[in-house]
Each structure stands twice: as structure tokens, then as C-alpha cells.
Amino acid sequence: MKNIVLVVALLAFSFGNAQAFEGKGDQKFQVGANIQDYATGINVSFDHGLGENISVGVSSSYALGGASGIEDLDFGDRFDFKARFNANLGNVINIDENFDLYPGLNLSLKNFGGHVGARYFFTEGFGVYTEANFPLAKYEKDAIDIHNQFALNIGAVFNL
């Protein structure tokens, strides 16, 4: 019985110390799946806290496969790189200190867009995230639609 109480106390302590966004100097690395109509791929992103509720970062996705015809695409058509700005609202909405909601804007090689994401940390260094990305303006009318559509990212997030 003492061992069970000790394990529960340690888990509660580790969950209690996790914090989704710590403000200035906070650094997050995310890796996960990129899911969209025309392709499925991988997504990686890095965010750096500039203030209590503001972060900037970079994100990149690469389309691995999906709809017919994607196998003929070049690397440049499959790859996208974005600079991003986030408003981290976890401490504003105050649901849980382990939870962060972050809407933002991104400027990519393919378009100008927005995103809305959420992170939940189980421990001080590890959690899960999901993020919805949507284009607001395409650079080229005839641009390949892989990166110019609604996309969902889901995966793991790490505190650095």
C-alpha cells in the first residue's frame, strides 16, 4: 500500500510541475504527422517564447504520400517551411497549467496562413499537441494544392 501511495504522489508531483508555456525564453520542439486531403506527411516545429504570452518559431512539413499523382512531385513541391507567430493563451483561459491554446499566423514558402493549436504536458518535458493549419492567401494561383489546403498536425511536444 505504501508503494502505491508513493507512486501516486510522485506522478501527481510530476504532473503538477508540468507547465505548458512558461513565457520569455521558453522553448518547445514538436514532431508529428501532417494530415490533409492530398497528402500525408511529417511536421516539425520549434517555438521560442518572447514574452508572457508571445512566441515565434519555425515549422516545416514534408508530404510523403497520399493522393494519386503525388509520387511524381519534386522535393520542392513536397516541402514547405514557415515562420510563425503565436499568442499563447494557456494562462489567460486558465483551464489547466499543463494546457496551452495558441492561435497564430504563419508566413511560408507556399502561402500566408493561420493556425490554431493546443498542447498538453504530462510531465515537465513531454506532452502531446494538435494543430489546425489553414491558408489565408496563396502566392500563386496555379500552386500545387498540397500545402494550400486545411491540414491537421498531431504528435509529441518536448520542452527544451
Image (cartoon, rainbow, N blue to C red):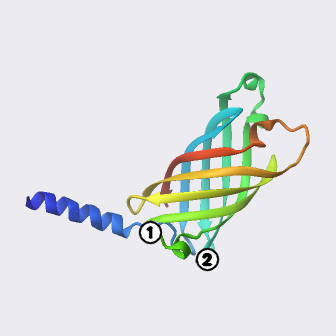
Question: Which is nearer the eye, 73 or 117?
Answer: 117
Q: How many marks?
A: 2
Depth check, mark 1 against mark 2: the one in front is 1
Q: Position of residue 101 (x, y in %)?
A: 57, 64
Mark 1 sits on what residue? 96
User: Hey, what amino acid is under mark 2?
Assistant: Gly
Q: In this image, 4 relative to 29: left or right?
A: left
User: Hey, what amino acid is under mark 1?
Assistant: Asp
Q: In this image, 123 relative to 59: left or right?
A: left
Q: Mark 1 to mark 2: distance in Å?
A: 19 Å
Residue 136 tag number: none
Res. 83 image quadrant: bottom right
Q: Position of residue 151 (x, y in %)?
A: 67, 44
Looking at the image, which residue is at 71% across and 45% down? 150
- Farthest residue to the right: give it: 141
Residue 51 tag number: 2
Q: Position of residue 127 (x, y in %)?
A: 45, 55
Looking at the image, which residue is at 81% across and 50% down? 111
Q: Position of residue 160 (x, y in %)?
A: 49, 61
For the residue carrying disc 2, how many other residues have a C-alpha within 10 Å: few (<14), some (14-19), or many (20+)? some
99 relative to 139, above or below? below
Q: Earlier in the sequence, mark 1 or mark 2?
A: 2
Q: Secondary structure at mark 1?
A: loop
State the quadrant of the N terminus. bottom left
Question: Which is nearer the eye, 115 or 127?
Answer: 115
